[in-house]
């Protein structure tokens, strides 16, 4: 369990971590992040939400990592985070950008309940949480082809993500897949899935996440939605995984 860190110490840690990664936040967003960190770590001792459960881990791997998305989002956009788990990257984005309307979607009730409760506690009015399966909710109204931006971190391989995530994106919008090292390989394997689901790689941004004594490579794969996704997608989950595009 380690030695408990005061809110003040945690706040300093978060600010140092964001500073070393060149991430600037609006005033008082850091305090909200510190409260979220405390709540996540405390809840995680009772309910298994995430394997990242130290203040240092949360600051770097949940907060700084999630916030690498900031330069690629615009005020006023709607964002759906597929497979958000306990709310990553959805919650840090909602905290940092109050004018982006963020929805977190996950199939696991206890995780989505954590995100929803945390958002209420933090007073976030631009955040909502949705419990369900992406392949079911993406099949029709009110969620299909309705978001400006869809994100996914640590949910699956890119070819599978195209089928799960692109149905939610409006034509002209984008899907941003957050990946660590495997980006180039996954892009190569996703050619068919992209063509079939209406996506086109716009950009692959490689960046470095700077920890106290480690440097981690990250990729943001930005996929533009150039055509509507055919109605046959998404298929049932067993089909998506057994017979990926
Ligand atoms: N994005 C979070 C959680 C990653 S774990 C983070 O980076 O911390 C992957 C999550 O995706 C799990 O919580 C799992 O419940 C969810 N998930 C996987 N497949 C899904 C699907 N088809 N529909 C909805 N959620 C899904």
Image (spheres, helix red, strand yellow):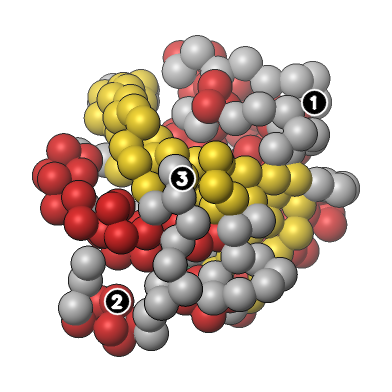
Q: Name the residue under label 2.
A: 240
Q: Nearer the viewer, residue 157 or 239?
A: 239
Residue at (47%, 73%) from the top-left corner? 231
Residue at (37%, 65%) from the top-left corner? 163
- In the picture, the quarter occupied by the C terminus is bottom left
Ligand 1 within 8 angstroms of badge 1 C-beta: no
Q: Earlier in the sequence, mark 2 or mark 1?
A: 1
Q: In terms of image quadrants, where is residue 226?
A: top left
**Can residue 165 be seen here?**
no
In this image, 239 relative to 71: left or right? Answer: left
Q: Which of marks 3 and 1 is nearer the N terminus?
A: 1
Q: Name the residue under label 3.
A: 225
Element marked by disc 3: strand
Reply above or below: 7 against 142.
Answer: above
Reply above or below: 235 against 81.
Answer: below
Residue 48: x percent and y percent? Answer: 49, 71
Ligand 1 within 8 angstroms of badge 3 C-beta: no
CA distance for labels 3 and 1: 35 Å
Residue at (50%, 41%) from the top-left corner? 174
Residue 190: x percent and y percent? Answer: 21, 53
Frontmost of labels 2 and 1 is: 2
CA distance for labels 2 and 1: 42 Å
In this image, 241 relative to 72: left or right? Answer: left
Element marked by disc 1: loop
Q: Mark 1 points at which residue?
A: 28
Residue at (55%, 40%) from the top-left corner? 172
Residue 6: x percent and y percent? Answer: 67, 37
Frontmost of labels 2 and 3 is: 3
In this image, 73 relative to 231: left or right? Answer: right
Q: Which of marks 2 and 3 is nearer the N terminus?
A: 3
């Amino acid at each position: 369990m380690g030695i408990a860190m005061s809110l003040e110490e945690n706040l300093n840690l978060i600010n140092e971590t964001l500073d070393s990664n060149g991430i600037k936040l609006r005033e008082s967003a850091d305090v909200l992040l510190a409260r979220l960190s405390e709540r996540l770590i405390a809840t995680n001792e009772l309910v298994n939400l995430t394997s990242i459960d130290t203040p240092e881990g949360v600051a770097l791997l949940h907060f700084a990592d999630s916030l690498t998305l900031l330069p690629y989002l615009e005020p006023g956009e709607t964002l759906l985070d597929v497979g958000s788990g306990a709310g990553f990257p959805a919650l840090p984005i909602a905290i940092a950008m109050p004018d982006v309307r963020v929805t977190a979607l996950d199939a696991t009730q206890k995780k989505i309940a954590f995100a929803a409760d945390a958002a209420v506690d933090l007073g976030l009015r631009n955040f909502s949480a949705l419990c369900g399966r992406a392949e079911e909710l993406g099949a029709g109204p009110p969620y299909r082809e309705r978001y400006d931006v869809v994100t996914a971190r640590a949910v699956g391989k890119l070819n599978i993500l195209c089928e799960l995530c692109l149905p939610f994106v409006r034509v002209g919008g984008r899907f941003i897949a957050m990946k660590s090292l495997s980006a180039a390989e996954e892009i190569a394997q996703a050619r068919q899935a992209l063509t079939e689901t209406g996506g086109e790689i716009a950009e692959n941004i490689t960046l470095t996440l700077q920890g106290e004594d480690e440097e981690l490579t990250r990729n943001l794969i930005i996929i533009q939605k150039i055509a509507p996704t055919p109605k046959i997608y998404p298929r049932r989950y067993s089909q998506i995984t057994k017979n990926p595009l």
